[in-house]
């Protein structure tokens, strides 16, 4: 099962990214473990210094922006 991490401190853009991830999973009938990461040290360890960020299976897919649904779908599949 994929591990999807949403990195951010809870700003509106971070919450939007979380909603997009859940929408993509539901629309495509996919399952994944989704985790919100608010710990700055963990973010730094992943090499992320701007939020929101999306990490899938340990690979940073985007940081500092909200990716489109299409991008998220491509990364998850």
Image (tube, helix red, strand yellow):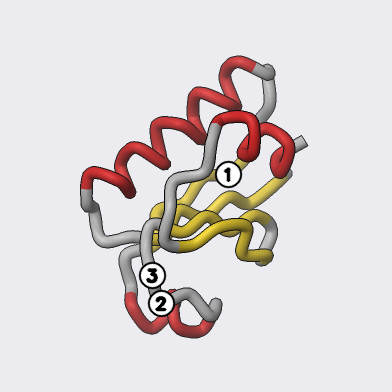
State yes or no: discs 2 and 3 in contact (Cβ < 8 Å).
Answer: yes
Eyeballing the image, is 67 above or below 70?
below
Residue 11, given in percent of the width and then of the height, sits at 22, 52
The answer for how far apart the CA atoms under marks 2 and 1 are is 23 Å
Residue furthest out toward the right: 77
Q: Residue at x 51, y 84 (%)?
A: 45
Circle 1 residue: 33
> Which label was assigned to residue 69?
none
> Which label was assigned to residue 50?
3
Which of the two discs, 2 and 1, labels the residue nearer the N terminus?
1
Q: Quadrant of the N terminus?
A: top right
Towards the viewer: 30 or 12: 12
Q: How many marks?
A: 3
Towards the viewer: 70 or 28: 70
Q: SS class of the residue under badge 2?
A: loop
Q: SS class of the residue under badge 3?
A: loop
Asked if residue 27 lies left or right of residue 5, the reply is right
Eyeballing the image, is 18 above or below 11?
above
């Amino acid at each position: 099962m994929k591990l999807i991490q949403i990195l951010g401190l809870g700003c509106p853009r971070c919450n939007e990214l979380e909603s997009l991830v859940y929408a993509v999973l539901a629309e495509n009938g996919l399952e994944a473990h989704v985790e919100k990461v608010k710990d700055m040290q963990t973010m730094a360890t992943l090499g992320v210094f701007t939020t929101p960020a999306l990490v899938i299976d340990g690979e940073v897919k985007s940081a500092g922006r909200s990716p489109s649904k299409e991008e998220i779908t491509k990364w998850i599949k």
